[in-house]
Image (cartoon, rainbow, N blue to C red):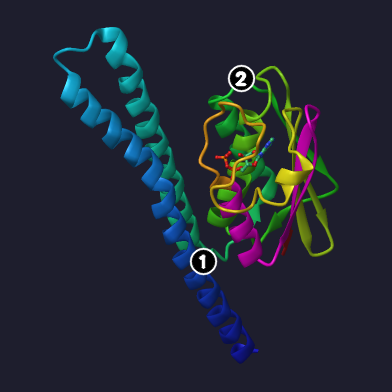
Amino acid sequence: QVELELCQALQQIQQLRELKANFISMVCHQFRTPLNAVSFSNSLLKRHIDEWTKEKTRPLLDHIQTAVEKLSRMLNDILFFANAEAAKFNFETEPLDLIQFCNELVIQIQMSSSHDINFVREGSCGSARIDRQLLEPILKNLLDNAVKYSPSDSPVDLQLSCKSGKVIFQVTDRGIGIAVADRQQIFEPFYRGKNIKNIPGTGLGLSLVKTLVDLYGGQIAVESEIDIGTTFTVMLPV
Ligand code: ADP
């Protein structure tokens, strides 16, 4: 038993190493575009600052601001990713009160959103040995997306159910939906759907969610219809 656990831990470490190597090269690539935009706009501004009117300089300044905001969002997401990964190897053994946990999370999301977030539970769910630091980024990302990709007057549901040896969370929104072609790729780092228009994001959230669910030995599924809504289902073994 000890040998098996050691073997599994080593496999996870190897998996993480590969993931990190790929991730770093992708991050560098993704940072280059906004950095180039800042550098190019800045050098144009420096060259023409004395002769250009306000109308001419403003779009370049806006361009710089958009690129800097994008860089800052990416940094935040990467830090979140790094912290969540580190937390994975620090299992809390205390049982987690799932209902209290979900209630707290809903209040937290509700504070920064005008959506109604409904918490629905099915069957009897008490406490389970799930690491809070692992669960929080999973559900927070799914709820943040549900809020971000749906109209502010539409409700979002968080459903919790427990079946033999499994805890199931479902996050449902009535938003823009995810096209079939995008559904294959949304869990890839930096991938963003074709229908997101100008909704800001980095494409990192779902890849973090998938990584954590996989490391935990769980499953994630998505059902969606364009302009009707999306449901993400996460199943975790307990
Ligand atoms: P981000 O939201 O920063 O783009 P994510 O990795 O969280 O990054 O999501 C990847 C893509 O999946 C999004 O760009 C979007 O196209 C799609 N997506 C995720 N959640 C939803 C949702 N609830 N409704 C519609 N599209 C979604």
Is residue 214 located in the magenta-colored stretch of the structure?
Answer: yes
Q: Is residue 76 left or right of residue 209?
A: left
Q: Total number of numbered labels?
A: 2
Q: Quadrant of the N terminus?
A: bottom right
Residue 138 falls left or right of residue 52: right
Vertical arrangement, residue 34 with respect to residue 118, above or below: below
Q: Quadrant of residue 194?
A: top right
Using the image as rendered, state which of residue 54 and residue 150 is in the foreground: 54
Q: Position of residue 191 (x, y in %)?
A: 59, 46
Q: Mark 1: few, some, or many residues within 10 Å (few <14, many ≥20)?
A: few
Q: Where is residue 186 shown, x and y percent of the image? A: 65, 48
> In the rendered structure, which disc, 2 or 1, sits on the residue that comes first in sequence?
1
The C terminus lies in which quarter of the figure? bottom right
Q: Amino acid at mark 2?
A: Ser
Mark 2 to mark 1: distance in Å?
36 Å
- Which numbered marker is on residue 114? 2
